[in-house]
Image (cartoon, coloured by chain):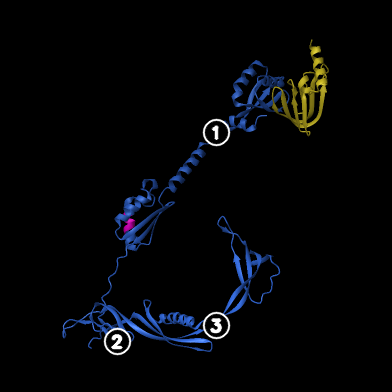
Amino acid sequence: MKNQWVHKLSGYVRMKISGPYPEMFINHCIERKIPVWDIKYHGQHELVCSVLLDEIPRLRRLARTSDCKISFIGRKGFPFFIHKLWRRNGLLFGAAFFLILVYLLSNMVWGIEVEGATPKVEHELRQAVTELGIKKGAFQFQLPPPEKIQAIITEQISEATWIGVTRKGTTYHFQVVEKDIAEREPLEAPGHLVASRKAVIYDMFVEEGKPVAERNQMVRKGDMLVSGLIGKEGEEQQVSARGSVLGEIWYEATVEVPLSTTLYTATGNSYRTHQLHIGKWTIPIWGWNPPEYADAKEEEYEREWELFGFTLPFHYGYKDWLEAEEVEQETAEEEAVAIAIEKGKERILPSFSANAEVIGEKVLHHFVENGKVIVIIHYRIVDEIAKKQPIIQGD
Amino acid sequence: MKRIQKRLRRWMTEQMDLPADVMMDLPRVTLIGNFHIYIENHKGVIRFTAEELRLRLTEGELLVTGNDFVIKNILPEEMLLEGVIKDIRFIKEGSSGR
């Protein structure tokens, strides 16, 4: 049997056969290989059946030779559907019009967004963009591509280093990076440079001003290093002394280092338990009787599972119980002194500037007391000692 | 002559175990429940109403009675009838059906 949809595609009609012997007409059709289906009895001497649209001329010829009359009562299938649709062409045109409208509207510019610009630059940018034709209601296909717009705009607006142009649907985004014009440093108030702490001058570099101190000279806190008064005596000019003065500072530190330390070491015995983590809960799945160690350390391992970028709500993990042992570690005196030097450095450096450098250290004295080594160390540190001091008027 | 041919066919069917409908041009009627009847090897429709279908066979006629008959499809050798089938009857040649 043929599929019904084939008939629907080519179109078919309901045909009424009336005559004294309509069955004969059906028989004739079958003999001539005209497909006939859905035959129904429609009262005496009347049958209704379905026939293909293409076969109608043959059926008419057949009807003429037989004593039956045929009439068509229904039209079905795709060709008739198209015909029907065409008669309601307003609907068709409406749908087409709608599609065109949606297409046109979605290809218009509906918004311009400027980001990261000062009001002045934004105004300029908006003007430049309007000149290019980018304004509300403009068609996108009449505009140059964003890359080209970017090139033109970046060239036009001198205040911006870079303007990024992107189109998101119906909106143009302009991302502006403005030029940072370096501001001039304000003129500093005239002043001297004085020592911030007691030191021996290690090195000095004067940019402006008259150096008063010399290298290897010892200075106390508050001593003048670079004077802000330059020129002949009596008619000095006031300037802001600038420069860097490095001073060598001596520093004595007392450091205590214990001779013995308690450490925990793993004995090598371990026991592993396995868990399944679901959300906040942990469900043990293996390892029920962990041995009881006197000292133990736990090491946990967990890893989240991901599937297509999503983190699964459950994952596997295991825990290792490592048996630990307490071990006393004896440190030799010489070693302890070396440790003390490093410890001392770490302790004193925070009280200096970040650029401070230890140029020498010397152990002055060390002795053992109560299982500790007490070390007195002398450090030589080089650090910036110059500090600004304004010239007080009328001095 | 025809009679000899017929006898030969019957003999072959019996002796060689061949399907009877193929050898002897007999109708093959398949019934699905009481609502579908599939008839092969018919020789044309004699009468068709909503309660009755009468088919010509090589020998005699086939009468199907019931309600709401619709011929779903009809081809030179086969047809599918739909409806509530009540009775299927073979009628010998010569005797009146009604």
Amino acid under label 2? Met
**Which residue is label 2 attached to?**
A218
Q: Secondary structure at mark 2?
A: strand
Which picture quadrant has residue B40? top right
Horizontal arrangement in the rendering, residue A98 relative to residue A128 (left or right): right
In the displayed structure, B74 sits above or below A229; it is above
In which quadrant is the N terminus of chain A drawn? top right
Q: Which residue is mark 1?
A: A82
Q: What colour do you see for chain A? A: blue
Q: Which chain is yellow?
A: B
Q: Secondary structure at mark 1?
A: helix
Instruction: Say yes or no: labels 3 and 1 on the same chain.
Output: yes
Q: Report the residue at 63% width, 68% height from top.
A: A320
Distance Cα–Cα, label 3 vs label 2: 42 Å
Label 1: few (<14), some (14–19) or many (≥20) C-alpha neighbours in 10 Å = few
Q: Are marks 3 and 2 on the same chain?
A: yes
What is the chain letter for disc 2?
A: A
- Mark 2 Cα shell of 10 Å, populated few (<14), some (14-19), many (≥20): some
Give the percent coordinates (x, y) of residue A29. 67, 21
Q: Which mark is residue A26?
A: none
Per the image, label 3 sits on a secondary structure element best described as strand
Q: Residues within 10 Å of mark 3 (few under 14, many from 20)?
A: some
* Quarter residue B43 falls in: top right
Residue B49 visible in the snapshot: no
**Residue A238 x %, y %:** 21, 81
Q: Chain of mark 3?
A: A
Give the amino acid type for the residue marked by disc 1 in the picture. Ile
Mark 3 or mark 1: which comes first in sequence? 1
The vertical placement of A225 against A11, above or below, is below
The range drawn in magenta is: A124-128
Q: Which residue is mark 3?
A: A260
